[in-house]
Amino acid sequence: MVPLARRLHTRTRAAGGAGALALVVLDDVGKTYRGRGGAYEAVRGVSLDLAEGEFVCLLGTSGCGKTTVLNMVAGFEAPTAGRILLDGAPVRGPGAERGVVFQGHDSLYDWLTALDNIAFGLRLRGLPKRERRARAGHFLRLVGLDGQGAKHPAELSGGMKQRIQIARALAADPRILLMDEPFGALDAMTRATLQAELSRIWAETRKTVLFITHDIEEAVALSTRVAVMTRGPGGTLKALIPVDLPYPRDRTSDGFMAVFRQVHALIHAEIHPQ
Ligand SMILES: Nc1ncnc2c1ncn2[C@@H]1O[C@H](COP(=O)(O)OP(=O)(O)OP(=O)(O)O)[C@@H](O)[C@H]1O
């Protein structure tokens, strides 16, 4: 029998992963929640390889299991079927190489300034104060908030708070950014600005990103591949669409429209099954 690692390697190559060993491998992953109300199969048979430096959007209708997949990659939830490998080793819980950015901004500490929020995780890692502040300042600038570091969360707009969350995740220098609808609660204009900024930051840092959204335009604007899920229960991967368009993306270009229409048709079929 071919060893699992070799099989996965081969599959990544076949999937166009530039011949690189995948950084994250989801191998036939499933999740069934069991509670007092009985069992609910949220995710079924998801297989997906993320190569280093990729930006993959997980797109699907509400309740299809996107957050469940992300939580399993983050190590917050364990799969009940299949397995998830990080650099070839099974994920057994959260780890510093995976930074998570959630929807909303409740995870910021109200009593800390913007700068100290970004620096917080660095203190836990034992970095000296000067280095912490320098590093936090760098990421504050990277997310376009230079000069705002002394403000507390209550003095920042929703978009600014989301930027702080992204800066905080990046400051910890994770290999992988896991983003769960980070712009979902923002108005359309702030959202478009932050999408553009995230694209720029990604181009600069080349982090591997798994990004959840139910916004087709957002997915096509940001990602190198869009992973479309079927609706739940038992949400699974329906299609993997490569988005081979230059950044920054022109949303009015024929190429963009063509991918948008392709993804839209897949999602539409999930919302209105024949
Ligand atoms: N802890 C849990 N216990 C039981 N069921 C759960 C639990 N977490 C999620 N579910 C169910 O699993 C399904 C998938 O949920 P999930 O949050 O992963 O979907 P989603 O695609 O992220 O949805 P949305 O886009 O609305 O955030 C839903 O039906 C949800 O009710």
Image: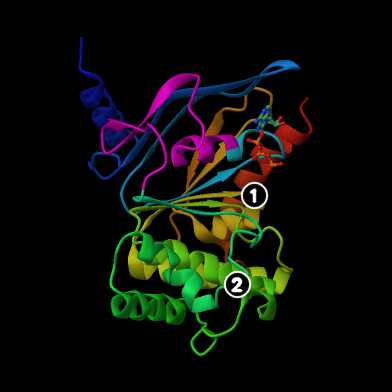
Q: Residue at x 48, y 87 (%)?
A: 146
Which is more foreground, mark 2 or mark 1?
A: 2
- Depth check, front residue: 104 or 271: 104
Could you say where residue 221 lies in the image, as x and y percent from the top left?
A: 55, 61
Whether residue 207 sits left or right of residue 144 in the image: it is: left
Categorize mark 2 by other alpha carbons within 10 Å: few (<14), some (14-19), many (20+): few
Task: Please name the amino acid that badge 2 sits on.
Answer: Trp
Question: On the image, which quarter does residue 202 sit in?
Answer: bottom left
- Depth check, front residue: 154 or 54: 154
Question: On the image, which quarter does residue 15 sit in?
Answer: top left
- Depth check, front residue: 247 or 54: 54
Magenta stretch: includes residue 74: yes
Magenta stretch: includes residue 249: no
Which segment did they paint magenta? Answer: 68-95
Mark number for residue 111? 2
- Depth check, front residue: 210 or 17: 210
Task: Please name the amino acid that badge 1 sits on.
Answer: Arg
Could you say where residue 187 lies in the image, as x and y percent from the top left?
A: 74, 69
Could you say where residue 270 lies in the image, as x and y percent from the top left?
A: 71, 33
Write down the residue under mark 1.
261
Q: Secondary structure at mark 2?
A: loop
* Ligand 1: quadrant of the figure: top right
Q: Do the residues bearing badges 2 and 1 touch, measured as CB atoms within 8 Å?
A: no
